[in-house]
Image (spheres, rainbow, N blue to C red):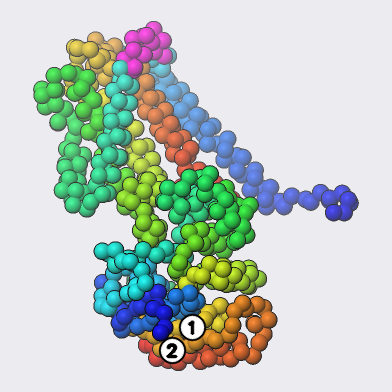
Amino acid sequence: MSDTPIEEIDIDPVEMRKAQALKREKIGRWLLPLIVVVLSIVAWDRLCVWNDIPHYIIPRPGRVLDSLITDWSLLIGSLGTTLLITFSALAIAIVGGVGLAVLFAQSKWIEMTFFPYAVILQVTPIIVIAPLIFIYVESKFAGLLICAWIVAFFPILSNTTMGLNSADHNLRDMMKLYGASRWQTLRFLRLPSALPFFLGGLKIAGGLSLIGAIVAEFVAGSGGVGSGLAFRILEASYRLNIPRMFAAIILISVTGVLIFMFMTFLSWLFLHKWHESAVKREI
Amino acid sequence: MEEAPLLSIQQIGKTFSNGTVALRGMTMDIEQGSFVSLLGPSGCGKSTVLKIIAGLGNLTTGRVNWPTSNVDNLGRPDCEISFVFQEPTLMQWATVFENVWLPLRLKGISRSNAKERVEEALDMVGLHDFASSYPRELSGGMKMRVSIARALITRPKLLLMDEPFAALDEITRFKLNNDLLGLWEKFNWTVIFVTHSVFESAYLSSRIVVMAARPGRVVEDIDVGAPYPRDDEFRTSTAYNGYCREASNALHSAMDAGDHL
Ligand SMILES: Nc1ncnc2c1ncn2[C@@H]1O[C@H](COP(=O)(O)OP(=O)(O)OP(=O)(O)O)[C@@H](O)[C@H]1O
Ligand SMILES: [Mg+2]
């Protein structure tokens, strides 16, 4: 190695512009949505004031915030109830969806026989099945759980089934050549191939299980143990407590967004090392 | 008396469901310990033959016999077979190490017990420093070399290779040619080697089988009598040139024979 100092090479202006654009994009990703939210809140406030809309029809943002603060303990308890149902349903949906998908993947016959049921469950609106479920199922918690599960499990089942069947054919041949057992093929080839599909399904199912839980609470109505956020909204609407309705709705939305963000993170965590959807492009 | 061949292909034919006749009436024996090249124009059914030998595709007609091995009820022999596919065929989610380890892992050999052999195989293809890389971080030729390392790790009795060196530069290819010949002699493998290159086939093989297209069939069977070990000197010898010319002529007549182009 020669010890002459390495000359500073001027950074290519094109590269520099690219880097700056990238930086701007990074900031913009957070800043732009934030600006939109703030502007919308301001517009909401102004519209209420300028049009003299009474607070029992559309409350101003400040009132909603007040309600959020004063009713916090009430709302947070309800949120807890709703979340408990949401995540329990999601967990069962994952176990059930993946389990069924693995079963389907073992034999075309099983898939052909049972897949229609999954489709029927999916296309029948939960809102019309829920009342029946609450008639037949004694425990309200179990009823809520079943409703949320029905909504959440289909995307997991259908995505995972597709993923298990999408394993590379040459790799399957190779497994066969090396005498892999059914279980080994599943473990080393089909499950990893299905992972990106499963995570895609999970992203949808996370949001759906929340929606399923809320819808079921609406149908179940008041009384009994569970008084989740939907129950709070119903109750507030009877009392014309509009700010609390808004506060509860905001809580639901924020929860949904957080669930989605968590699922996106999970996806990144498992895939960023190898899957096309998650790796950073460098050329 | 002559030794029984390792396998004997008899009148095999393969017609795909879309009506393509890939092979018809193909017959050949593969002798124990031979190095056979399959040479032929693109689309003449070379990959199809290899897959059928490996028991990965079903035949339309004919059969593959294994006179010296026990055969299970699916017609698969009990001898160890390895396959290097035309594409690298790696598991995207696994590191280079894990990809090479796979055949041993399927036999229940743990990571630590397999380590030595995996590293040895990676050394052989010059990828020692890339054990923990993911396939997407490698170049096309490097991926192919991982795939070769994976095939070598089981020390197979029969090695099926489908254009394994097509994506490599000449120097690396020459090196791997020599390494492959060395291993073949050392472990007494039988190799069936698909290639497009007349020169490669003449350098490596003890026998060159030239195929014609649609339907795929054997049109020429060239015995390469030159002794092993062969080295770079062989590449410049007149004998080598003779075999190249012979194979090249056969390939030309095969091109004319097929309804190719
Ligand atoms: N899955 C398939 N379905 C239908 N036809 C196929 C299929 N696979 C291969 N073929 C046909 O069979 C013939 C032989 O294919 P094969 O892959 O064995 O050729 P090859 O000799 O390996 O060619 P190359 O040198 O280009 O790899 C081709 O004409 C191809 O069109
Ligand atoms: Mg081929």
- Which quarter of the image is occupied by the N terminus of chain A? bottom right
Residue shown at 61% from the left, 89% from the top: B239
Label pair 1/2, CB-CB below 8 angstroms: yes
Q: Which is the main secondary structure of the residues drawn in magenta?
A: helix
Q: Is residue A76 magenta?
A: yes
Q: Nearer the viewer, residue A49 or A7?
A: A7
Amino acid at dot 1 = Ile
Q: Label 1 lies in what chain? A: B
Name the residue that disc number 1 marks. B208
Can you name the residue that lies furthest to the front here? B1
Q: Which residues are magenta?
A: A65-80
Dot 1 and dot 2 within a common chain: yes
Q: Is residue B198 above or below residue A92?
A: below
Name the residue that disc number 2 marks. B220
The image position of residue B200, as x and y in percent, is 56, 78
Amino acid at dot 2 = Glu
Q: Is residue B225 magenta?
A: no
Residue shown at 42% from the left, 91% from the top: B256
Say which element carries label 2. strand
